[in-house]
Image: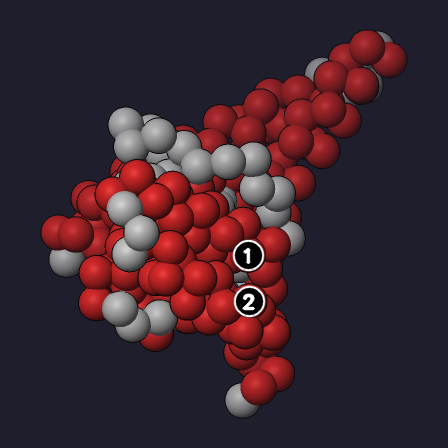
């Protein structure tokens, strides 16, 4: 089961690390949800976990300005809230080394892997996600392995067949390499995690 869990985690990382963070851009994402809670309660502490310590002063200042602006009028409240959401998400994404291109609309649908992870967290069970990931990893490994084995039978028949074998070989080797690396290395959000590690 340990190997299965590693494979599941590895596939999740391989498939979705390049797009991680897009979820945090959404108006329905966890960063904006935290910002809404902070503004409703008038307490910035609800959002500070989403930014590194080096950016805390900037967020505290933005929060104070937002609270002050909100009191002016309903229209000012709407504009101020939006500005704070954008500021918080921008700073959060900068800590991940990711660009900020604006907030995604409320009806934004995250990538399938991110949605699967959210569903697992909401349900309190990883079983369904683990099964789907394990099935995908297993299928990917077996397909690539079979391709190499088949190509190997004809590797010396011609230069073309030899190149076909090399292509299948490289594909299989790097797929396994990525799985192994993903199962043994931290996944995403390096900025905040690295800083937390240094602080402790």
Q: Are marks 1 and 2 in contact (CB under 8 Å)?
A: yes
Can residue 86 be seen here?
A: yes
Residue 103 falls left or right of residue 107: right
Can residue 16 be seen here?
A: no
Question: Which residue is rendered at x = 38% and y = 42% of the image?
Answer: 79
Name the spot of residue 149 as percent of width and height, x first: 60, 28
- The residue singled out by tag 2 in the image is 58
- Judging depth in this view, the residue of 41 and 138 nearest the camera is 41
- Judging depth in this view, the residue of 76 and 47 nearest the camera is 76
Colour scheme of the picture? secondary structure
Circle nearer the viewer, 1 or 2: 2
Name the spot of residue 191 as percent of width and height, x first: 60, 64
Question: Which residue is rendered at x = 41% and y = 67% of the image?
Answer: 64
Question: Which residue is rendered at x = 67% and y = 26% of the image?
Answer: 168
* Mark closest to the chain's N terminus, 1 or 2: 2
- The residue singled out by tag 1 in the image is 91
């Amino acid at each position: 089961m340990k190997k299965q869990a590693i494979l599941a985690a590895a596939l999740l990382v391989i498939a979705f690390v390049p797009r991680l963070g897009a979820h945090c851009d959404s108006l329905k994402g966890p960063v904006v949800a935290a910002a809404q809670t902070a503004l409703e309660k008038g307490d910035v502490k609800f959002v500070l976990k989403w930014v590194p310590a080096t950016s805390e002063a900037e967020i505290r200042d933005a929060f104070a300005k937002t609270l002050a602006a909100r009191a002016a009028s309903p229209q000012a409240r709407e504009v101020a809230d939006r500005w704070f959401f954008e500021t918080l998400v921008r700073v959060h994404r900068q800590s991940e080394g990711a660009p900020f291109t604006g907030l995604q609309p409320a009806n934004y649908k995250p990538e399938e892997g991110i949605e699967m992870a959210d569903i697992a967290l909401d349900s309190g069970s990883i079983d369904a996600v683990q099964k789907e990931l394990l099935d995908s990893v297993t299928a990917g490994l077996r397909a690539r392995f079979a391709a190499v084995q088949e190509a190997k039978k004809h590797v010396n028949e011609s230069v073309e067949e030899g190149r076909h074998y090399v292509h299948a070989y490289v594909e299989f080797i790097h797929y396994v390499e990525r799985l192994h690396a993903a199962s043994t290395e931290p996944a995403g959000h390096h900025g905040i995690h690295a800083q937390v590690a240094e602080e402790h």
